Image (tube, helix red, strand yellow):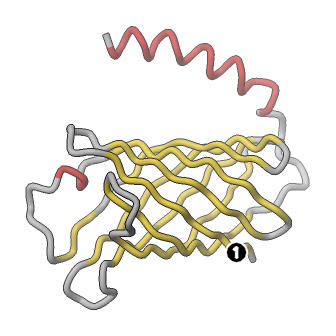
Amino acid sequence: MKRVFTLLLAPVILGFLAPHLLPAERQRIGFLFNLGFMTKGRISANWLTFGPELMIPLGTSVSLNPEVTVWGSSFGTSSYFVAPGALVSIRLGRLSVGAGPVRRLKYSGYPKADSSERISLKIQVGYGSWNSRIALIVIPLPTNDGVHYGLAFGIGF
């Protein structure tokens, strides 16, 4: 069933993206430093997050955004994650919508059976102005352990 859904959804997405995949002439690679927080199924913040994100233009409105984020509960050496990922983002004016794989890599303090260490889909909706962005983040976990929600503030250079 998942393959059938993917095979039906892929042409729709490609059809939508086709006009936006024009050559990325005169567009430069962007850089954001993100600072925010992530939760796990509730409103109170579980982790503070920070890390860099590149914005590599693939067309006039589409970009590839590789990122590495550190999630820390106390920012000591007792419990933190490193979460590399890559998003494909579509910009519609100041609004951006992106999705892509992300994986948390445990460094200490959490049990090995934590399902959030598997590759998950990250969905991000952002609003940008000049050299800054605010983004809402949703990461559904691959098992039924819940959903991570987050908010990130990015400053561009």
Q: Quadrant of residue 128?
A: bottom right
Q: Secondary structure at mark 1?
A: strand
Residue extending furthest toward the right: 26
Check the image and report above or below for 123 versus 15.
Answer: below
Q: Is residue 93 left or right of residue 54?
A: right
Q: Position of residue 27 (x, y in %)?
A: 85, 55
Q: Which residue is mark 1?
A: 155
- The residue under the point 34% across, 47% down is 147
**Residue 140 image point, x, y percent:** 36, 42
Residue type at mark 1: give it: Ile
Q: Position of residue 2 (x, y in %)?
A: 33, 16
* Quarter of the picture holding the C terminus: bottom right
At 65% from the left and 21% from the top, the residue drawn is 14
Neighbor class of circle 1 (other Cα within 10 Å; few <14, some 14-19, many 20+) is some
Residue shown at the point (67%, 58%) measured from the top left: 55
What residue is shown at x 24% (from left), y 89% (from top)?
A: 77
Q: Where 12 falls versus 124 (above or below)? A: above
Give 54 or 117, whichever is nearer the viewer: 117
